Amino acid sequence: MASESQVTLTLEHIGKRFGTREVLRNINLTVKPGELVALIGASGGGKTTLLRVVAGLEEITSGKLTLSTENGQPSRTRVVFQEDRLLPWLNVINNVTLGLPKNTHPYAYHILESVGLAERTGDWPSQLSGGQRQRVSLARALTHKPHLLLLDEPFGALDALTRGEMQKLLENLWNTHKFTAILVTHDIEEALQLADRVIVLRDGEIAREVVVDLPRPRKRSDAHLWELAESLEKDLHQPELNLSGEVAAS
Ligand SMILES: Nc1ncnc2c1ncn2[C@@H]1O[C@H](COP(=O)(O)OP(=O)(O)OP(=O)(O)O)[C@@H](O)[C@H]1O
């Protein structure tokens, strides 16, 4: 079941300071309805801050942020974090439906089925594996029928095998529900597997945008994917340049 209406996110000249520290600078970005954009970049580059700004969890210092739905309805945004943030005293179904009216429960069961947890709805979070808990987090977000889903390294704490399974699951859910998404990740391969566009954030600025124009599901062995991965890898590990263009001494 797709969201009833899709959303466009527009960021214009967004700036964010924490005290005197400038963390985001002149961010200009439009995310189209149904687009999946990955944000990558070195640690401290501002990825989480940008996601929090979009989620409305941080105020911007300058610029303009617009979220507009096709039918003018208020947009719904949900965030999935690296840690699952489930309430340990609620079972799976109650975690997923927390704050939602009773009549949404059948939909919640449907979503839990689609993330492979139909048999685990009565379990406590402590009875689940890390991957299963992240499935619950995804289900909880999707039960709210978000127009915009923000994912902050959602699979970062999982082992490689589980991470691969979760990436496939996210892709399937995105295909089914057609939400717009921003995925923060440290994993270039993950970004290239899933995203329509990869944005490199460096020192609070957009350093590069790469359109990943490859059919899905993408093959890890695809030569073009490897080329993109190599070039993004170089981007991420590029030493800082000083103003004269020389490599700064470390
Ligand atoms: N609440 C805050 N107060 C002060 N500084 C902050 C705050 N939140 C983030 N910062 C600073 O903003 C900068 C960007 O942090 P952010 O978490 O957005 O980076 P990131 O790219 O997500 O990093 P990582 O990949 O390590 O998660 C860092 O220098 C960080 O110390």
Image (spheres, helix red, strand yellow):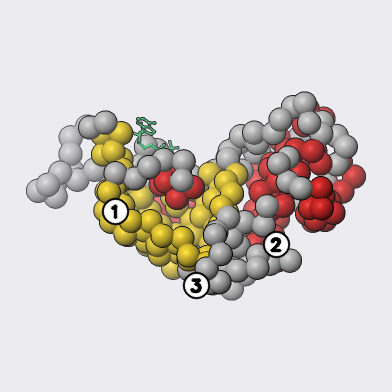
- Quadrant showing the C terminus: top left
- Residue sitting at x 32%, y 59%: 12
Residue on which the image places disc 1: 63
For marks 3 and 2 on the same chain, the one whose residue lies earlier in the sequence: 2
Amino acid bearing label 3: Asp
Query: In the image as oriented, which residue stretches furthest toward the left?
Result: 244
Mark 2 residue CB less than 8 A from any atom of ligand 1: no
- Quadrant showing the N terminus: bottom right
- Residue sitting at x 26%, y 31%: 19
**Horizontal and vertical percent for residue 209?**
37, 62
> Which of the four quarters of the rendered structure image does ligand 1 lie in?
top left
Amino acid bearing label 1: Gly
- Residue sitting at x 46%, y 46%: 56
**Horizontal and vertical percent for residue 16?**
31, 43
Q: Which type of secondary structure does the marked residue at label 1 adopt?
A: strand
**Is any part of residue 235 visible from this angle?**
no
Residue on which the image places disc 2: 172
Work out whether residue 46 or residue 91 is closer to the camera in this orientation and state it. Answer: 91
Judge left or right: residue 218 versus residue 24.
right
Amino acid bearing label 2: Asn
For marks 1 and 3 on the same chain, the one whose residue lies earlier in the sequence: 1
Q: Which type of secondary structure does the marked residue at label 3 adopt?
A: loop
Number of residues whose C-alpha sits closer than 10 Å to that of mark 2, classed few (under 14), some (14–19) or many (20 or more)? some
Cα separation between marks 1 and 2: 34 Å
The part of the image, by quadrant, that contains residue 147 is bottom right
